[in-house]
Image: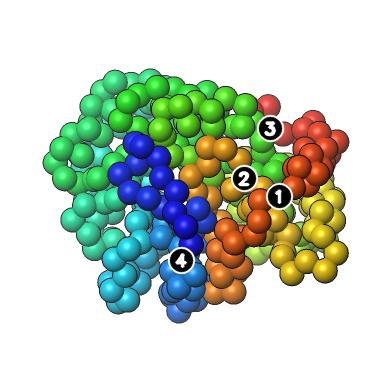
Amino acid sequence: MDTRSASRLPFPVSPVGLGCWQLGGDWGEVTEGSAHGVLGAAAHAGVTFFDTADVYGDGRSERLVGSFLDARGVDDVRVATKMGRRADPHDASAYTLDAFRDWTDRSRRNLGVDTLDLVQLHCPPTEVFSSDAVYDALDTLVSDGAIRAYGVSVETCAEALTAIAHPNVASVQIILNAFRRKPLEEVLPAAREAGVAIIARVPLASGLLSGKYDESTTFAADDHRTFNRSGAAFDVGETFAGVPFEVGVAAAREVAALLPEGSTASTSQLALRWILDQPGVTTVIPGARNAAQAESNAAAADLPPLTDEQLARFEEIYDASIRAHVHDRW
């Protein structure tokens, strides 16, 4: 797989990465063997970027990634983690240098490394993005050698633009998919101009854009697609990109119809290719519950760019079916 780069990010990454939330929890049970199978399949397919967080399974995801990389002797995969959600998500005063040191020390132990490749603030309170003291603390971690670079994971475009304006922010992770297009307007152009990497998360709208669900599909009780549809546990945009399930299912059928007759590509690959075709995207991080999904996601990088007709049809589907339902914060 080819790589992509951004001037503020100190290493190149594969255009398709691997999101590792599901290895920790909130997506139903994933065994250790299945997790290592997913990680192995992704690495074998050329994926060189894994994204995790300290709160995914209370560190389970980080530990699984760390044990996999140690056991396989893999040294060409860069690992991004996230910190901040271990604190009160509404308390901006919790984002201090001492807290950052505690959180990054824990992540370094979980991953089995001395220096973390990339640490992202994990959707903190909005005022954190404007705090010079927060960025000074992150710069200190870089100087200390605890982290190589830092970025942010955001819920809103305004938060992304605030972070991009700070000169040492290397990356912005943001929800971007065919059902969540607002970052295309200002965030991606600003990131390209500044040399900030864009990490596209929730790329398949929690599976809606796989085209595999219908109106009768149900999920396990411990799956966020059951318990967070209205944003009861965390931001509603993290589940189905904030789109009502039935609306998304119907729109996904229209996306699936864009595959040319006889095509061997999947709807998921088509949706991932749409993201990869957006100027400014550095990497996209779909999750996978098994090795076959990880391999299929990685293969999206091999698809040819979408045609003008396909891109126009994506926009028509969004305008007709999705735009009116996108969460107000966007």
Query: What's the CA distance linking mark 3 and mark 1?
Result: 27 Å
N-term-proximal mark, 3 vs 1: 1
Residue located beneath label 3 in the image: 327
Q: Amino acid at mark 2?
A: Asp
Q: Position of residue 8 (x, y in %)?
A: 34, 36
Q: Quadrant of residue 259?
A: bottom right
Which element is circle 3 on? loop
Query: What's the CA distance linking mark 1 and mark 2?
Result: 7 Å
Q: Are marks 1 and 2 in contact (CB under 8 Å)?
A: yes
Mark 2 or 3, which is nearer the eye? Answer: 2
Residue located beneath label 2 in the image: 277
Q: Are marks 3 and 4 in contact (CB under 8 Å)?
A: no
Which element is circle 4 on? loop
**Depth check, front residue: 309 or 185:** 309
Residue sitting at x 44%, y 54%: 3
- Name the mark on residue 306: 1
Residue located beneath label 4 in the image: 46
Query: What's the CA distance linking mark 4 and mark 2?
Result: 19 Å
